Amino acid sequence: MSEQSPRQEFSGLRMGKPFGIPVYVSWTWFVVAVFITLMFGPRFQQMLPELDSVASYVVAFAFAVLLYVSVLLHELAHSVLAKWYGLPVRRITLYLLGGVSEIEKEPPTPGKEFMVAAAGPALSLGLAGLGLLGDVYVINSGGIPEVLIWQLWVANFIVGVFNLLPGLPLDGGRMLRAGVWKVAGNSGTGTIVAAWGGRVLAVLLVAVPLATSLSGGQELDFTDLVWPLVLAWFIWAGASQSLRVAKIRARIPQLNARALARRAVPVTAETPLSEALRQAVEKRAGAIVVVDHDGRPLAIVNEAAVQATPEHRRPWVNVASLAKSLEPTMVLDADLTGEPLIEAMREAPGSEYLLVERGGGVYGVLATADVNRVFTGV
Ligand SMILES: [Zn+2]
């Protein structure tokens, strides 16, 4: 699997930095390792009767580790190709349901999106093929290596095929998204189609085993549904998240700095806050800019700091103490719109920006809160 949206920071064990990409193992992986060891221990003992029970659990643990090594290789395939295309990769994390590559930027073309998504399943299926060939032609004398490789190729085959299912957040979903993006010429349409594919998959993952057992006339065993339910929940949640992001992204082209600007009232640094606010009301301005005696802007008064100042203190506080000095990155072209506007704001995260005309004149103040409101619709 691979994912683009930034995840919350969480603690994990850092395992190394292959190809310059930091690899972390989440604590949830250890839960899975124990689970796999307990589940496969008896199975290995059955297949390898010469092992005692301790040895078969050791083999089962080795299987758990090797399985995750192959998941890591799957993720590295995504990440290394993404890096090759010049996309920044923050890290790879191995966790409960496998692995996730955090690629910080969307590929610029549907072709590259398709290739980055396809690289993972291609690697898993390649490993499965190698394992199968190895088992048939090279290590066919029985014993631990053959049984281990057999289990591993089957597991990699399942990982490869499962990830090819055409719904987000699976790799197959990203491949479908790339295909629709190519045909429709719009990545947002691709996301919506592939996310709905994910939701349909989630429903089928539970509905198919349920229908099969019901039509077979068997009594329903709910423990058989635990794993499909976990996977279905994961896929449904991922698909829904993609839909939310697509909805937000669809609004970006409508952004217009000039249209969102607040009129700014210019005051000098020593002006009391109460006086500046009076002028702002009088001029119907939504922002206060601190200027020098020649009228050049120096700082923007922070709205949150104004709100936090009690009414009775306002005559005794001067505006400069509530203002943030203008950095060059806080001064934006009033003509900015859409993606370039978001990019400029991302470069210098803050609550207010000064909008200037091409000639250098002040147009107004852009408040981040006003931009966010376009997305939340509040
Ligand atoms: Zn993948």
Image (cartoon, grey):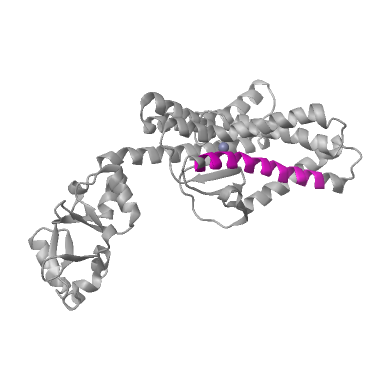
Residue 129, position as x, y percentages in the image: 70, 28
> Quick check: can you spot residue 38?
no
Residue 216, position as x, y percentages in the image: 68, 21
Horizontal side, residue 157 vs residue 312: left or right: right
Q: Which of the pair 241/333 is nearer the observer? A: 333
Q: Which residue is rendered at x = 10% and y = 68% of the image?
A: 294
- Specify the quarter for ligand 1: top right
Find residue 293 and report its image quarter: bottom left
> Quick check: can you spot residue 249?
yes
Residue 359, position as x, y percentages in the image: 13, 53
Horizontal side, residue 22 vs residue 284: left or right: right
Find residue 269 and report its image quarter: bottom left
Residue 82 covered by magenta stretch: yes
Horizontal side, residue 188 vs residue 89: left or right: left
Residue 342, position as x, y percentages in the image: 31, 48
Q: Which of the pair 242/65 is nearer the observer? A: 65
Magenta stretch, residue numbers: 58-83
**Quadrant location of the N terminus in the rendered image:** top right
Q: Which residue is rendered at x = 72% and y = 43% of the image?
A: 66
Q: Which residue is rendered at x = 45% and y = 26% of the image?
A: 179
